[in-house]
Structures are given as C-alpha cells and as structure tokens.
Amino acid sequence: MVASRSARERKAAVEAGPLARVTIDVDRTKAFVYKISCTTCTAKADKPWSAYRPGGDNGYLAAMDRWTFHLVEKHPDADAPCLTYLPDAQHRLQVRRDSGG
C-alpha cells in the first residue's frame, strides 16, 4: 500500500526535527514535490530558507539530504533523527560530485 501525502508529510516532519516545516505538493505530472523549510533561517526577501525537490524516486532523499546539510552547517547543536543519516548523505553528495552531476 502506498502511503498518503499526509502520512509522508508526517514521517518527513518527524525525521527533519523541530526546526523544520515540511510540506509535500503534487506537480502537474502527479509526482510528489518535497519542501522542507527552516523555522528560523531566512533566504532572499525574508522568505524561510528551504529545500525544494521534485518527487521521483529520490525526491525525499534529495530534500532530506539538503536539509541535513543545512542543520549541520547552520544549527550544529540541533537534534533531529535525519542527522543519523549524515554519512549516507555525504556519500551521495560525493558520488554526485564525482560523476559531474
């Protein structure tokens, strides 16, 4: 059984921790689009910093990896379940860099 969008949002919110706000939209192709925004950091025009990644097979991982890197860089004392996957996220980033992607 495929999890609903709201169930996926709840799971991602738990993994991302208390500094995150997680939303999942659906794009025109009916694929999930993951957005994880920071409740304390801002980007341009005072909008919350966010990781926005289209669904597909790795949309969740791509958004969560980016969020994990944000936590490590900007909130080093933060505690979130996703931080246990930091070595895996770093490995995926290195693979992308090595392949030129």
Image (tube, grey):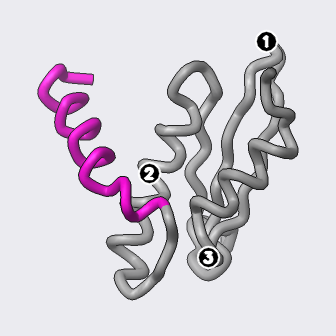
Query: Picture coordinates of residue 19 (x, y %)?
Result: 61, 76
Give the residue drawn at x 32%, y 56%: 86
* Relative side of 85 to 57, left or right: left
Query: Picture coordinates of residue 98 (x, y %)?
Result: 12, 27
Q: In this view, does 46 lie above or below 5?
A: below
Residue beneath disc 3: 19
* Relative side of 40 to 30, left or right: left
Q: Do the residues labelled 3 and 2 touch (CB within 8 Å)?
A: no
Q: What stretch is highlighted in magenta?
A: 82-101
Q: Which mark is residue 63?
A: none
Give the residue drawn at x 37%, y 61%: 84
Q: In this view, does 55 lie above or below 76?
A: above
- Marked residue nearer the N-terminal end (3 or 2): 3
Residue beneath disc 1: 29
Density class for disc 2 (Cα within 10 Å; few <14, some 14-19, many ≥20) is: some
Q: Residue 66 carries which label?
A: 2
User: Farthest residue in the bottom direction?
Assistant: 77
User: Farthest residue in the front direction?
Assistant: 1
Give the residue drawn at x 79%, y 12%: 29
In-front residue for pair 36/4: 4
User: Farthest residue in the top direction?
Assistant: 29
Element on which disc 2 rests: helix
Name which residue type carries label 2: Arg
